[in-house]
Amino acid sequence: MAEINELIVNIWRGQEKGRLVEYRVPARPNQTVLDVVTEVQRRYEPSLAYRFACRVGVCGSCAMTVNGAPRWTCRTHVRKVAAGNRLTIEPLRNMPRIKDLACDMSTFFGKWQKAGGRFEGTLTRNDPPAAVDPVSAERRAANAAIECINCAVCYSACDVVTARPDYLGPAALNRAWTLVNDVRHAARRETFDRAAADGGCGACHTMGSCVQHCPVGISPTASIAGLKRMSLLRFLGRAPE
Amino acid sequence: MVRHRHHRAYWAFLGHRLSGIALAIFLPLHFLTLGLALEGAATFDAAISYADLPLVKLAEWGLVILLGIHLFFGVRLLVLEFLPWPDPASARTGWILPGAAVAFLIGVVFLVGAF
Amino acid sequence: MSERQLFALQRISALVLGPLVIIHLALILYAVRDGLTAAEIFSRTRGSLIWTAFYSVFVIAAAIHAPIGLRNVLSEWTPLPRRAIDWSMAAFAILLAALGLRAVIAVVGG
């Protein structure tokens, strides 16, 4: 039974094999989950491994699973998520665990590449800047998805990623959609082909957990729907090439 | 503790998938029953007289609702995938509860007619 | 068949099934009143070109749509290998088409 001003915090220790270890931390009026993790590591458990960088909600490094949902811990007030002063903190889902709260993101970034996410320019420094119409449908579609910082919260929330190791995932497909709509990109068709291949946009079941959890307010579901539309129209021979 | 699934669009996915599985299992049985008509009206009548059993009517009621759910949740998906979105964050989740409600309404009409 | 093609077939068959299912549901709600008998069904379907066409299209669309959907379920929710799933779903499609068209003949033929 916790004191009113005490948090009971269960933190994952170990790797794939491990267990939740309980720590008790003073409850403070203004406290984020990252504050809690930091306090545990500094005061009680120096060997606790976790990631963070900016602490102010712009880098995405501190993403973890908090009480079952993937979140940026620096932007999560304890009061908002702690039911009865209890917190359970685990690493992000769908990625191998390196140690404690740090997981291996190399597959996540690999899929970003595999989906055709690498930009290829067509101009040189001697050319004038590309003329991109900011209100064209293509640019507006790209703009709606462009602010992704690859924090992997959506990837962690997605059940298709869990069920299908070859599924490219919401972030990679969202990135592909921005490039498919980018008039400066030299490989728009190739990016689309990669995004629509096996394990690509067709595997999305519109569960919507990605939209629900994205801290930046992006809708990968909408981007993937755009890719699906393009895929069907091309199949029917009714899309602009 | 799994909390990332606790939102409406996920329930819509689950309802659509589970109803689809049930219908896929039901279909071959449905076709086999109808195929009994090949053996004449008498045999066919004997087979579908089972439809008068209350338990069978209840099962049919369930199937009608499942078909309705699969249809309305499926229409939502087709609309999401082929029509422009009103805004990128709105996955037409407002269609989910009404869709399920209409499916249940169809079920009510069926029950009233069947009993 | 690539997943792109399967995806397209799934969506196209869904577009076909939509209106057909609505009509079928309406028919069920109508036919189920006053009890279901062979005579009542046959009075509508026997020798009817329209119902033959309607249900044949319905059967083919369902025989495409259901196995592709089940393929996703099996690959995500069971440990079965991909090839086994693909082959069994192809077989399921053929089974549905065969049983379904046989059922159409049964209620439409004489």
Image (cartoon, coloured by chain):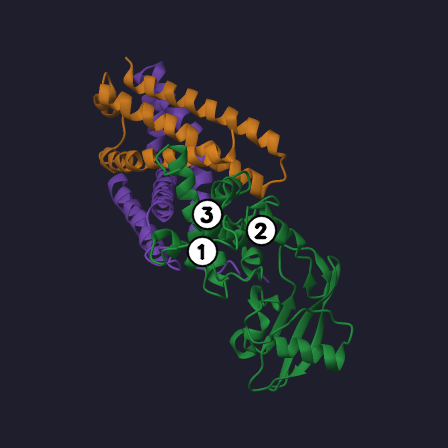
Chain colours: A green, B purple, C orange
Q: Earlier in the sequence, mark 3 or mark 2?
A: 2
What is the chain letter for disc 3? A
Q: Specify which label sits upstream in the sequence, 1 or 3.
A: 1
The residue that label 2 is drawn on is A112
Q: In which quarter of the image is residue A42?
A: bottom right
Q: Is residue A230 above or below residue A86?
A: above
Residue B25 showing in the rendered view: no
Give the letter of the chain under mark 2: A
Name the residue carrying label 1. Answer: A128
Which residue is more in the foreground, B78 or B15? B78
What residue sits right under mark 3 in the picture? A180
Mark 2 neighbour density, 10 Å: few (under 14) some (14–19) many (20 or more): many
Question: Which mark's residue is nearer the viewer, 1 or 3?
Answer: 1
| Rendering coords of residue A119 (x, y %) | 54, 51
Direction from residue A62 to residue C43 in the image, left or right: left
Q: Distance between the residues labelled 1 and 3?
A: 22 Å
Marks 2 and 1, how far apart at CA: 29 Å
